[in-house]
Structure formats: C-alpha cells, structure tokens
Image (cartoon, helix red, strand yellow):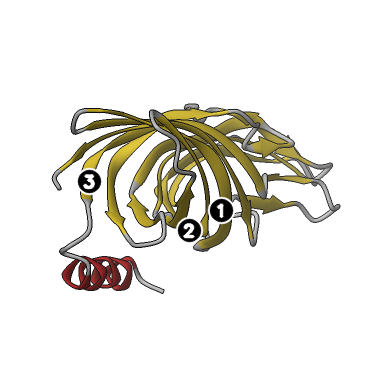
Amino acid sequence: MRTSHFLTLILSLASTCLAQSISLGVIGGVRATDDVSGIESASKRYLVGPTLEIGLPLRLSVEFDALYRREGYQGTYGNFAFTAVERERANSWEFPLLVKYRLSFPLVKPFAEVGYAPRVINGNIEGDYTLRVPTTQPAVHYTRKTDWATSHGIVIGGGVDLGIGRVHLSPGVRYTRWNNSAVSVAISDGVGFQSSQNQVDVVLGVRWKFH
C-alpha cells in the first residue's frame, strides 16, 4: 500500500474525530539492535520525524509517524571467482500507523501500542569489482541505485505519557518484525549478507496537544 493511502486514512480519521484531541510533534530515538549481519554496518542509529496523534474514546488513540533513518553498509565480499569492495549510502523511511491504549493515572499514563509500518529504502551503491578467474583483472568501478524491496512490519511497544500543560512527552520502546530482509545480497556459493528482520528502538515523542 502506498504512503499516500496512509495519509488519506489519517485525514479521514481526523475529519471524523474533530471532537477528540489532536496532537502534533516530533519523535526521535535510537536503534538498540544491529541492522545488518555478514558485513560492516554504516547505518546511523538515530531516527527522527514528525508525528500526529488523534485521540479516540475509551482511552484509545491513533498515531501516525514518518521516521527517517540513514542506512548503509560497507565491506568486502566475494568468492574464488571475484572480489567486490562495496559501500552503500541510503535513506530509509518508515511510516508506522499505531493504535494506542492508555491507562488512566493522574500524572504519568502508561500506554501500549500495536500497528503496522511500511518501509522504503532508496540510495546509491558504489563499489569496485575484480574478476579473479581465470586471471586477476583490474578492478572495475561501478555505481548503481538501490532497488531494495519495500518491507512491511508489525509494530508492538509501550511507554508512558507525561503531560505538562499542552506539551506531552512520551518515552517508549518499540519492537518491529519485518516481513523480509530489505537489504539482501547473496553470492553464488551461498555466502552473503542481509539486514535483520528484528528491530528494537528506544523513542521519545514530544507533542503539542491542540484540544
């Protein structure tokens, strides 16, 4: 499903929930798990992006985020026939759509959340390819766009919400299980590398509650 469909869904929810609370802000955090195995990661651990939350009855709310990460890897791989020295630098965007449930405590309100997130990764790969069989050849430099498949993840998490006037702080932890290894390189003899399907993030949301 395209990102535009999610935005349409959020706007539809907002139009039907004008009597409930609406909060806008930013969310940031750090990735607590490794993102790739079999090669050196060059990804940044931070994440950041805008967030929108719409309050619903029964202590429920809907949250939509657009999270940016800087993704990449670098290293050498190959087999008896070739060697490749490669580096990727890419932009990763995740769009979690979450349903949250809060407990009704006076000051600090614990919450649990569950939802769905698509992820797209776009960037560039640069490398040097050397053919070793039958004889070693000079390295050939190449560049190409990344063509990683879109990932789809199930998100679960929890945290606490602290309200100070109209400002709300929401520290929490999220776990995402992706349906595929978006970054995946396989070599003919079975050796290669791939991104992890398990992701844990420590996040902090800062929102302004309008009403």
Q: CB under 8 Å between callouts 2 and 1? A: yes
Q: Earlier in the sequence, mark 2 or mark 3?
A: 3
Kind of residue at disc 3? Ser
- Asked which secondary structure carries label 3, the reply is strand
Q: Nearer the viewer, residue 190 or 162?
A: 162
The residue labelled by disc 2 is: 117
Q: Position of residue 119 (x, y in %)?
A: 46, 56
Q: Residues within 10 Å of mark 1 (few under 14, many from 20)?
A: many
Residue 202's disc is: none
- For the residue marked with disc 1, what is the amino acid? Val
Q: Residue at x 84, y 42 (%)?
A: 80
Image location of residue 8, percent across then percent down: 24, 72
Kind of residue sitting beneath label 2: Ala
> Dividing the picture into quarters, in which one does residue 59 lie?
bottom left
Earlier in the chain: of badge 2 and badge 1, it is 2
Q: Residue at x 16, y 71 (%)?
A: 15
Q: Residue at x 74, y 36 (%)?
A: 38
Return the x and y of residue 149 as percentages of the image width and height: 52, 63
What residue sits right under mark 3 in the picture?
Answer: 23
